[in-house]
Amino acid sequence: MPYFLAKTVDIFLSYWWIYSPIVLFLLFRALWLVYIQTLTAKAINWVLLEVKIPKEILKTPKAMEQFFAGLSGVKSGANFVEKWWEGKIQQWMSCEIVGKNGDIYFFIRTPVGFRNLVEANIYSQYPDAEIKEAPDYVFDVPEDVPNKDYNLWGTEFVLVKEDAYPIRTYIAFEEQVEEKRLDPLANLAEVLSKLKDGEQIWLQYLVKPADDEWKKKGDALVAKLIGKKIPSKEGPLWKALVWVGQFFRDLIIGLYKIPEQLSADEKKEAMASLMQYLSPGEKEVVAAIEMNLSKIGMDTAIRFIYIGRSDIFSRGNISAIIGTFKLFNTLNLNGFRPNKLASTSVDYFFKKRREYAKKRRLLNAYKLRMFTSKPFVLNIEEWATIYHYPTYIIEAPTVRRIEAKKGDPPIGLPT
């Protein structure tokens, strides 16, 4: 063993009594937080609401954007005691679109404490909607799926780029002429309406308010794209060490290369002129990111599961759903892609056994509406694009709608 490596191991073993308590404390703290927050999550009382909409909705997805803006009011913080002793967490909701035997359903699963908020925000934008509590559809399939009678395929969707890059939103689908206006969910509704008896497609969109960290990262990304220097937030000691390191670096470089110095005015002019060298496309990207960051952000996780009888299980339905998410992609900005780590497809070793385990794990996560460990952020405009109630433009006949409007009782009716 080399002397340096042997000496390092010797020091590591000799001073175990110094670092071991620190390591054990950090490990215990992390495990404790997971434990206490898991207990809190299990104690939440949930309710599943089905939303039925009128046959004609004249509103654009902008109405749903206002709905999600209202939901951002559930954001809550936690002090030291609430976080580490009570296990307080940010509660979340699940917005779900389900295709079942050719019928299309819209659900929202919410903590009971948020039910009034959810219903009030829906009615404020869709006064003629009908909301009722519904049994959980996830228990309508056999408990042991996948089995010899039913097969399953699923995945989670993630963003192609950083959260700050926006996806293609509903605004890009709109035109000034109303007859040419497109609904971003038209393709999805068409796919779900074509399902056969014995086929189901579940789409789950988990949502909770995001903290401000995503905007800070977005601002840093914009500064990087335009070449703007970000002020350092490090302390004076760190700045001094950086200065000393830079001094000796320049001193060594100066031994064989003449330093090129810029005056303060020249440096200022060079920094100020970086923006003008961006191409029109690069400027559009920067503008799109800044617009994206100007709206409320929501932590997001998206799951997709297709369940079908083994004799009619069709891979074409899987490709169709992945294709509907491609509609929101742009090459220069952002888009969705299946997460290979969460997908139920497996290559090579122990293929059947590993695929079965991944299918069971994904199905269990869907049933529990578990947030992923690394959610991404979409703003409320992006959310209104991927989840909204279909407009009259969608012709799919199996969307569950209200057949007749409810009339108000006569004014003078005695009560």
Image (cartoon, helix red, strand yellow):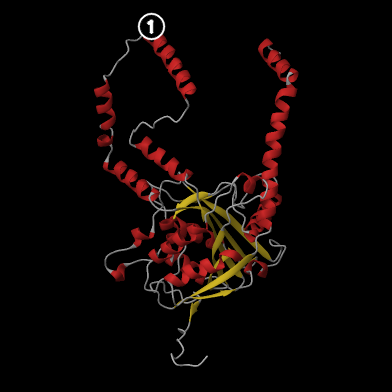
Q: Position of residue 232 (x, y in %)?
A: 42, 29
Residue drawn at x 29%, y 16% as measured from the top left: 261
Q: Is residue 276 left or right of residue 195?
A: left
Viewer-proximal residue among 232 and 150: 232
User: Which residue is the site of mark 1?
Assistant: 255
Mark 1 residue type: Leu
Splitting the image into 4 quarters, where does residue 56 fall? bottom left
How would you rate the neighbour count of disc 1 (Cα within 10 Å): few for under 14, some for 14-19, many for 20 or more? few
| Residue 356 visible within the image | no
Viewer-proximal residue among 115 and 206: 115
Q: Is residue 252 above or below residue 384?
A: above
Q: Is residue 187 above or below residue 165?
A: below
Q: Position of residue 142 (x, y in %)?
A: 70, 67
Residue drawn at x 71%, y 20% as measured from the top left: 12
Q: Is residue 195 left or right of residue 162?
A: right
Q: Is residue 198 above or below residue 248?
A: below
Viewer-proximal residue among 96 and 380: 380
Q: How many marks?
A: 1
Q: Is residue 193 left or right of residue 62?
A: right
Q: Quadrant of the N terminus?
A: top right
